[in-house]
Image (cartoon, coloured by chain):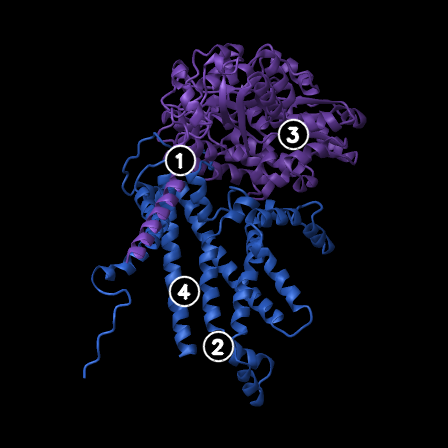
Chain colours: A blue, B purple
Amino acid sequence: MAASPQKNLFGGGRQRLYPWLLLLPGLGFYFLIGVGPSLATAIYSFTDATGIRGLPISWVGWDNYDEFIFAGARSRDNLDALQRTLIFMVLVTTIQFAVGLVMALLVNQKLRGRLVFRTLFFVPVILGVAVQGLMWKLFLRPGGGPMHEIFGLFGLESQFLGGPNAFYWVVVVQVWANAGFTMVIFLAGMQTVPADLYEAASVDGAVGWQLFKNVTWPQLTPAVNTNFLLNIVGSLQAWMLFLVLTGYRNGTNVLGYVVYAEAFGQTAASSFRQGYAAAASIVLFLLVLALGMAANAVVGRRERKYMS
Amino acid sequence: MKKLRLRRLLAFLFAFALIAAACGSSGSDNASTDGGSSDDSADDSASSDDSASSDDSASSDDSADGGSGLEGTLRVLIHQNPPGVEFMEGFNADFEAANPGVTIDMTVVNADDIPTVNQTRLSANDIDVTTISVTGFANAVQPYMTGADSPYWQQLIEAGLLMDLSGQSYLSNYDQAAIDGSSFDGGTYALSLGRTSYSGMFVNTDLLADVGAEMPTTWDELVTACEAVKEAGLKCAVAGGQDAWPVFVGTYGLLGALYPDQQALVEGLWDGSVTWNDDQGIKLFERYDYYANEMLDAESAGLTGDSAAQRYAVGDIAFGPMGAWNAGPVADNADFAWEYIPFPGSDNAADNQTLFGKDDMSFAIAAETPVADLAHAYLAAFSEPDSYNAFANATNYLPTQPTAALESALGTSIAPILQAGNFAIGFEQLFVGPKGAGQWANAKDGSLWMYNGDFTDPTEAANQAQADLEAGLGG
């Protein structure tokens, strides 16, 4: 006897359209807010749009891309910003990953006050970028700021955000601001590791580093992969801390900041060039896409290895 | 089944009501938007019916309140400048009292955000009177600036978003230079409310006398005075290094002293007859280097622009290379005699007589404001000599009305300079970089580069500036 076909949850006839009708508002919202602007940005990147109502918009073909990548010293500055973005990504991803993991390991111990430390480590995440920036500007104030005093104890001097190492201080702030989020994801992963795995490993004589290497780390694979991807994408898109901490300054700009500055008249020319900025943002998007896909391939392989 | 249909109908009506509510607010603003020029102001004044439906409407019907006949809400935007904001709040209160039907809705934004806010609010027709610029209109793209991008204020005018104020009677209260500085392509699109000098420095004359130094009139004399001050265990100069930009404010004077004709400098850089790395350019960068690394005290690194002025007022620092806008904190706190003089950057004392600066806060009216008559009345009231004089003295702007005069210590100090006609628009307001020029092409910031350690060799910095400029010029 053949199995009877499964009855459609919404019935037959026109009622089969109901699921699609119910999805329509969500899909419409997604296309309106997500896909639409993205497509519009891609189209704008081939125009000389300014974003100012009343000015004509002309199709300029690949001119914006040509200018961004090949025109004069400006293209060198853009490629420097691109390189700086990649350096920022590598540094932030690596350090934030390590710091978040260490913090998670610490607050996962059965120690008194661990809840307080979990909260303290996570607090920077809930502060806005402006607050984070203001706090660190005060902390890094040359001539009297706390970090200046600490440096003074070792006979060191620095202009911090005003000096040639300003870029690296922004890396520090970015890690401080987001390591708590990385920690939480690791912590959630650690708390799903079955206790009997540790017991079995202990019976086999594993201690300390061996427990971490052979039990915790493999079991953390989903959390590791999630953090890896989030850190890469987050650091590639980060630019607001640069806005708050250093401003539009030679030698510190990352690609996201270049997009903002060109689009909203924040460069020396104080001209609105939203078509050009759209081209820059498409370059940034392609970078995020390529690195995101590569990272996804790596973590996917790792996940299959450990979780199969 | 009937119940189901009823529910569907109710759900549909509910969804429709939500969408209508969400869209409703966007349609209520500015029903009358066909006004532009002042000639159209009568048309722009909404009828009494319109008044009932929109807060933004204004009426010229004198019978409405028995006062000036003006009514409605005027949306005004100004930039953050504490004394200026305080004055405007008082002015607005007085204007509202004199015009009982009028409400002023004033927004204050940071100066850096003015371009963005103007772009969005003018494009959305969401502002009536705005601060269009704090730099004046001097940097219009000139015919020889091939391919250069227009500054945002020029884009707004070309888009037809700013009203041409030509012919308005209140313009006659201002000097011709102010009108010229607010004009573009045959129209006057702004009202320059004041000028500011950014190329001078405060000099503690008591301290100089104590260490036996003379008031410097040339670069060598400045260096000599600085060394004498330091040998006496005091500090030569201080600026707001933490904010970065105040560092190069003082050296606008250095640039101006070495290139007294700033317009010719801009044109020369474009046509190649002047280069950043010729003899004069190298000299400029060497002096930038001395200024940044010898004159400025290390304490500058921890000071913002405002706090540097307050620190200077303590009295143990000889020179304060700062903008004239810092005169307030200096005057309020200094217990010593001081003067504000042009930065003596040249070896020739005659070239060190000019204060360079810019037109600062400039008001404009949105071309499509529905309350054009109210906006004009607001600017006219502001432009009344008594009102304007109070504004200039509150903000320490150098007046753009010939009848106004600064009564402050700054005003006294610079009165001879202004009376001699020694005020000029500076390089910052004139220079437009060629497309494709690199980030080091604008050497006005050179002292900051030396201060930040971006370069340690002045010649290398000068060469880089010229290379970045030539990259845009196609050289």
Kind of residue indicated by mark 1:
Ser
Numbered disc in front, either 2 or 4: 2
Q: Residues within 10 Å of mark 2 (few under 14, many from 20)?
A: some
User: Which chain hosts label 1?
Assistant: B
Q: Nearer the viewer, residue B48 or B198?
A: B48
Kind of residue indicated by mark 4:
Ala
Query: What residue is shown at x 25% (from left), y 59% (from top)?
Result: A17
Q: Quadrant of the N terminus of chain B?
A: bottom left
Q: Are marks 4 and 3 in contact (CB under 8 Å)?
A: no
Residue at the disc numbered 1: B26
- Residue B44 image offset from top left, x and y in percent: 40, 19
Give me the C-alpha separation between circle 2 and circle 4: 18 Å
Give me the C-alpha separation between circle 4 and circle 3: 52 Å
Kind of residue indicated by mark 2:
Pro
Q: Residues within 10 Å of mark 4 (few under 14, many from 20)?
A: some
Q: Are marks 2 and 4 in contact (CB under 8 Å)?
A: no
Give me the C-alpha separation between circle 3 and circle 1: 49 Å
- Residue B194 image offset from top left, x and y in percent: 56, 20
User: Which chain hosts label 3?
Assistant: B
Residue at the disc numbered 3: B321
The relative height of residue B258 versus residue B404 in the rendered view (above or below) is below
Give me the C-alpha separation between circle 4 and circle 1: 44 Å
Numbered label attached to residue A218: 2
Query: What residue is shown at x 43% (from left), y 20% (from top)?
Result: B48
Q: Quick check: A204 left or right of A14?
A: right
Numbered disc in front, either 2 or 3: 2
Give me the C-alpha separation between circle 2 and circle 3: 61 Å
Give me the C-alpha separation between circle 1 and circle 2: 55 Å
